[in-house]
Structure formats: C-alpha cells, structure tokens
Amino acid sequence: MKILIKNGRVINPASRTDARFDVLIQDDRIADIAKEIPVEEGDGVIDASGCIVLPGLIDMHVHFREPGREDIETIIGGSRIAAKSGFTSVCTMPNTNPVIDNQALVRFIRLEAEKGPINVFPVATITKGLLGEEISEMGELINAGAVAFSDDGMPVMSSILMRRALEYSRMFDIPVCVHAEDLNLSDDGIMNEGVNSTLLGLKGIPRESEEVMIARDVLLTRLTRGRLHVCHVSSGGSVEIIRRAKSDGIGITCETAPHYFSLTDSAVGEYLAMAKMKPPLRTEEDRRAIIEGLKSGVIDVIATDHAPHPLNEKMQELEYAPFGIIGLETAVPLIVTVLVKQNGFSYHEAFEKVTINPARILKLKRGNLSKGEIADITVIDPDKKVRIDDAFIASKCKNTPFIGMELFGSVEYTICNGNVVHTNK
Ligand SMILES: [Zn+2]
Ligand SMILES: [Zn+2]
C-alpha cells in the first residue's frame, strides 16, 4: 500500500527544506519526495493543499499515568490523544505508581505502547524509587529501552547524587532530564512569587527556586562533562543561565512548554487551579524571554508536560489542587498562533523544537522528513481555526486553561510508521 501526499508545503527543519513537494510513502518509509509524483492505481491520496507537511511531531515530556492511575490516562489512551494532536512520538515520564526504575517496567511500557497508534519512548528514573537516595541501574534501563533519565515531578536535591548521575549517564551518552526546583525555596508555594501572588494573597514560589537548581546543575555538568537537559524552563533568568552555559561549551539542552510562551501568572486569578502548574506561570517579561530564547535557539525543545488530572481533583481549592495541565491537544494551535502568527517565527524555527531537536537529543531516528526515513509525518492547516472546547478536547481529563480560545493550526493528518493514525477530513 502506498500513500501519496499531494500539493503540500513540505517543511523539514533538519534539511531546511521549505517548498511545495509531493511525498510518497511506501510501507513504513518515505519512498520519494519530488515536485510532481504521478498517482498510481491503488495509491491512497492525501490532498494537502493549503497545508504544511512536517516530520511527525515529537513530545519528549508527557505523563500518561500508567501504571497506577489508569483511571486518569493510559499509555494507549494517551497515545491516541497524541496521534490526534499531531505527535508520532512521545516520551513518558517515569513518576507513575510504581515508578519506572527497573527493566520490567520499561518493557511493560514498550509492550503496552505497541498496541497504540504511535511511538512511545520510556524515560526511566534517575534515582531508585524516585527517592533521591540511590542512582538507578542506568545500563540495564537503557538495555530495556529507556531513552533518558528523569526524576520529573521531583528535583534531585542532593548535589552529590546529581554529580554521580551525570557521571554515570555520561558513560551511555544519554541525557539526565531535570525538574529544576529547590524544594526549600518553593516552600509549599502555589504560584509565581510577585505582584500577582501578593494581590491574590497566595503563597509564592520565587523564580530563584528554579534558577538556583539550573545554575547548580550547569556547574555539575561542567564538572562531570555529562549531558544535562533542563525540563520546562519558565523564567527569563533560567534562559540567561542556559545561554551563558551554552556559550561556555557546557553540554546542556533545555525545553519549555507552550503555556510558558502563551500565558502569565495573571492567568491564576482568572483560571484558578487550571493555571496552577510547576514551575508556575511567570510574568510577561519572562514570557517574552522564553519566546526570545526559543527564537535564538537557547531553548532547544518545546515539550508539553502533558499532565492529566481529573476535574474533581483539579477543581479543589487552589491550595489543594494538583499542579499541572494537559498539553498535547493545544500544542500545535499554540505553536502556530503564538510563535508563527503573533511572533513571526518561521516554520523551521517553530517546528524544529518538536521534530529534529528532540530527536537529536534523544538519538531517535525520527524527526526528519527525507527520502528513506521512517514515514512519521504530520499535516497541519496553519490557517484553519480550531476552537478549544469540550468537543475538541478528547482527553478524559480536561484540565486546561485554554478552553474557550480560538486558535490557528489544525492537525489534518498524522501518519506514524507509514500508517494514517489520525485524520480530520
Ligand atoms: Zn517537572
Ligand atoms: Zn512533567
């Protein structure tokens, strides 16, 4: 079976391709990319007129809650939401119950994912039991299929342990992905510390809670010559520290999430717990710095930190509500609307963050729309509006502050390993 994508604008950040091409898929590979590929009998034809044709999107940071809270989201269910959202590959974070800190559990995730529509690459814990006391058996976890290490949800508070994790992971050339937060400084805060937390009378989390940990980990990465990846960067100060570290040649990469370039802490007053996340939404100045960091390339990746929580848990009083929002389904509309339409990003600048950049960091043979590569492809109509409402959000959990918004960027087709796994037509 062949699939021919006709009349689309092919955007491949990996090769800086931006031109009108037809794309032919045969089995699980991209068989040809050319100006005019004739339709043969039996070919499935996709008309991509008015659309951009991209490498399948990669989200290197999601929480699918399985094992442990399958009532919230499962690996298969989350994969379906990802497919609908244009993602052909995701990395699942290991802070499930039990946590993913042994080979059997890494294999479980991969086996479960095989029943779903997209590629799932498990991240395993940095420390056993996510307790921050003892380093996980990294070699074994990699053999079982782990692509990175993270204690996400929790920081590695011990500096000596972080040093060892970076030294150990260096042997495997695999990134240690950190949730950078000094828990002592966060001190049970629930939103960004600043004018808005004062006005709302809510306990603040200072930006320094994030920044001191990034600064520490940059220094430890310099010491160990390891590979650090900083998750969900939210503050302008963090961008500055990482900019400096990169210019010093330290082996560091980082990601931000769409909410940090779309919203500020004034959203907490409006959307309450729907705007409660860690790290917290910051100020307009920070939002501008995140956009600038993405534009200049200091920030390598956009990852959603997709974190489903049931509404009855999320709609408690702000103080008790869990941190986090879902992010898969709003990712493409926010990237297209905020970065491309409002801030003048080229498609390459915007979409390298969810294709070739995460692929390179994780050494995945994905994220590249070229002849001979695996046929993971996402077709987006950037001028078609979507309304973020209950019908649009297919996730079981609808914990998002973006409900009611109208945004540009509709995912028309998602093709994974040569199979059409989502269509909006
Ligand atoms: Zn985190
Ligand atoms: Zn997370």
Image: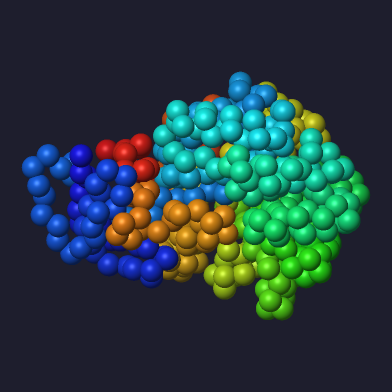
- Residue plotted at (20% across, 53% down): 6
List the single residue furthest toward the left: 41
Going by the image, does 410 lie left or right of 216? left
Q: Indicate left or right for 100 with 82 as reference.
A: right
Image height check: is 236 above or below 390?
below
Q: Left or right of 348: which side holds 370?
A: left
Identify the residue at horizontal 64%, vertical 49% (top origin). 148
Q: What is the x, y in percent for residue 211?
A: 79, 62
**Can residue 215 be seen by looking at this rendering?**
no
Residue furthest to the top: 71
- Determine the residue positioned at 14% across, 57% down: 37
Compare residues 42 and 138 and report the one nearer the observer.
Answer: 138
Q: Quadrant of the C terminus?
A: top left
Residue 95 in the image: x percent, y percent? 71, 36
Kindly indicate the quadrant of the structure image that contains residue 124.
Answer: top right
Query: Can the viewer see residue 147?
Result: yes
Residue 303 locus on image (x, y percent):
57, 51
Q: Nearer the viewer, residue 163 or 3?
A: 163
The residue at 69%/32% (across/down) is 96
Vertical placement of residue 264 versus 189, above or below: below
